[in-house]
Image (spheres, rainbow, N blue to C red):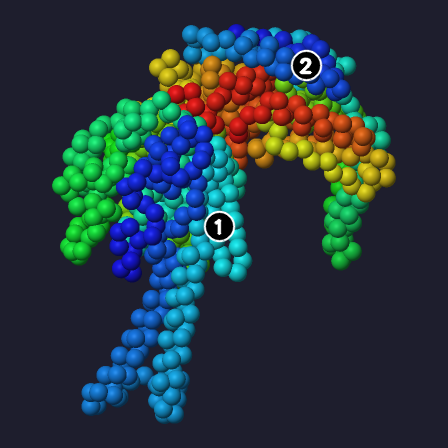
Amino acid sequence: MTDPNSAPEAPVNLSATAPAESASAEVAPTAVAPSEAASVALPITPETPAEARLELDIAAGEWQRVSPKYVVVDIVGWVIFGGLVTAASAIPFWFGWEFGWILPAVLGPVFLLVIAFTPRRVKAIGYALRDDDLVFRRGILFQRFVAVPYGRMQLVDISRGPVARALGLAELKFVTAAATSGVLIPGLPLERAEELRDHLVAVAETRRAGL
Amino acid sequence: MTDAQQPGDGTPSGKGTPSGAGQSGDAPEVARARAAAVTDYTDGEWHRLHRATPLFRGGLTLIIIIGVLIANFRERLIGSFVPGGDEFTPDDPLIDLIVRENLIPQAAAALIGVLALLVAGFWLSWRFHSFRITDEVVEVRSGILFRTNRKGRLDRIQGINIARPFIPRIFGAAKLEISVAGNDANVPLQYLRGTDADALRRDILRLASGARRAANPAPVSMATDASLAPDTDVAVDDGTVASAGASASASAGPSLGADGRPVDRDTPLTLASTVLESRVNEFLAPELDPDLAEPESVVRMDPGRLIGSTVLGGPAITFVLISIGLIVGIAITDELALIVGFVPTLLGIGGFMINRIVRSLRYSIAATPDGVRVGFGLLSTSNETLPPGRIHSVKVSQPLMWRPFGWWQISVNRASRSSAQGAGGQSQTTILPVGNADDVRTVLRLLLPAGVTDESMPLIDLGLTGSGDEGGFVPSPRRARPVRWFSVTRNAAALSPDLVLLRAGAIWRSLTLVPYPRIQSVAITQGPLARALRLGNLEVHTVMGPIAANLGALDRDHIVALFGGVSERAISGADRDTSHRWGAGA
């Protein structure tokens, strides 16, 4: 039986790739004990009974945050997108539809709200490098946590939009054989993104698995 | 056309020589593994395909065009020789011109020139189309002006499909399609002699499995697999003599071929009747080569059940609903033109239903040492071998109308998708078109031999029909009723030592099984509504396919525990997984 709370204690240090092998060797035999039981029971331990949000037992300090400058990139993106959509929604009004003003009047504030929450949203983006997998989180209203084992990595993509480039940021995409994994870490300083990419590639190489 | 039937025609099939062992300077165990091969296609040299390949791949159009031309000429010839026949001659300005200007020799020369050019083109394309199979890769190169070269790694093979479209099948040819992971990432070898295709598949799978069998270089046909029936047993069934005899002679030399029966590759066939007989034998031969697979499919496809399930399946119900809507619509509006709009839909659905029945009538599934072999088809057949560990997730589902009969269907997610295959993807992703609970258990055992055992069978049965928290399933809490009206006790997840089991649906029941080593990533999500109810959703990501292994509305604490449990097991499962070289340990 395994304890889901037994997440690796030590934060994985980027510069040290050596502990990778020893860690996996130590995790492997204990992770799934060959049991007679057909099913594996999971101990369910709520930390606080009232907690309804999703939260993993990864210490807050272990979550690595993206650069605060990413707020600017996100806001610029939303302003352009929201502006265009709101303008487009106002077209019926210009063409003389009496109640056409309702659409932009609804959409505009919604986008403003989204933009206002950008700093919170960016703060909610985080990733943690555990011994054998990368955990990525994002979202406040719609939360999403993804765990991708390093050995599943097919490729790592670094891409930079114009605004991000001006701020020296890049986004890193972790691609697996599943199209739905969707791990895209935005707002990383370029050198950090490159360092992370090299680290991920090196670690993935030591845990290479089939599909 | 006749050279399709000539034995030993340049395609280096069974010449009786123990293959490539002497010709290459590889390591001894490699040479021995090659010696164990049944065909010498796997010697790492370039080989060519079946000579009639261009004909099957488009030459038939040419023949049809020639036929039409000849038919036209016949009219004219009759017209010129039979008095009074002229009045039936259609007017054809070009031919009239030729006849009037007395250009017949020139026209004939042009025609012959075009024909010669086409034949030369076909011949060249055949010459330039070659393939080779080494210990690591299978490689195909083709094209005269625009050369293409495609390589597939053997240890990445997701399945090998042998398809026999109707016309090539008449001539005893088959298409071997090696799928590697990716969208339409297939290496097709079209066309090969049917018996060669079976033997070649066996050889490729042996190379891919990593099994060297170095310790057992002796009787070659036995080295194919130690547990096989001896050759003498194989020849019992009359319908299989052609293939069994051929593989025996190819593997062990001419001496073994002299088993008293005409073997279509070693003995030159001079009598047309013998050719015909062997063709008929091959045509009627069972899809699964009895040499390797159990000749009996483990699941019997009952025609009544097949037709019943098609009639009660989703598309059929759509069909009925559309028809009713159509009739009502016409009755109300008196507008018969409505039919026109619906005709394509009705034709499409009707075609799908007939196709499903025809394709699945000769359905077969059996275990082989190199994975599961699934066969479909009546006139055009295809049968595919899926090596172990190539099945990424399995879904057992039950449409509503099948429930009184206890029928289920099984589909899978695989890493390879062929664009050219199957009716509506039938053969590619539907592994069991319809079956009862026993069939489902049998097929699941074949598909996931590690995860589906006697021990875990009760759990799987609970997953199919059970509800509540029996046996390790943890269902949604009662507060999830607003989002799971009927299925709140059925909506459950369980972890077995080897599988994630996701059970869902009280009306449309389904069970999704994902083996840990195939999990690409795990996610949990929660939206505002789920948060208000203290719930969450689990997503187990596998390669793309018809199955999405997701389960919503589970208890929040359970979801968090599942996230930890599944992600840990995905890692440890992958560490222990050796299925990419499944025979290496054997």
Would residue B530 appear left or right of B230 to someone viewing this image?
right
Q: Quadrant of residue A182?
A: top right
Residue B448 in the image: state x and y as whole percent: 41, 24
Residue type indicated by callout 2: Pro
A56, B198: nearer the viewer: B198
Residue at image x 69%, y 16%? A18
Please report, as a chain letter, where disc 1 is located.
B
Task: Between residue B149 and residue A31, name the one nearer to us.
Answer: B149
Task: Say which residue label 2 marks.
Answer: A19
Residue displayed at 75% across by 50% down: A88
Q: Would you place residue B66 above or below residue B361 in this image?
A: below
Residue A14 at x, y percent in the picture = 74, 20
Chain letter of the residue beneath label 2 in the structure image:
A
Q: Circle 1 is placed at which residue position?
A: B141
Tell me the quadrant of the picture where the C terminus of chain B can be found.
Answer: top left
Which secondary structure lies at badge 2? Answer: helix
Give the residue at x 40% y 75%: B113
Left or right position of A149 against B8: right
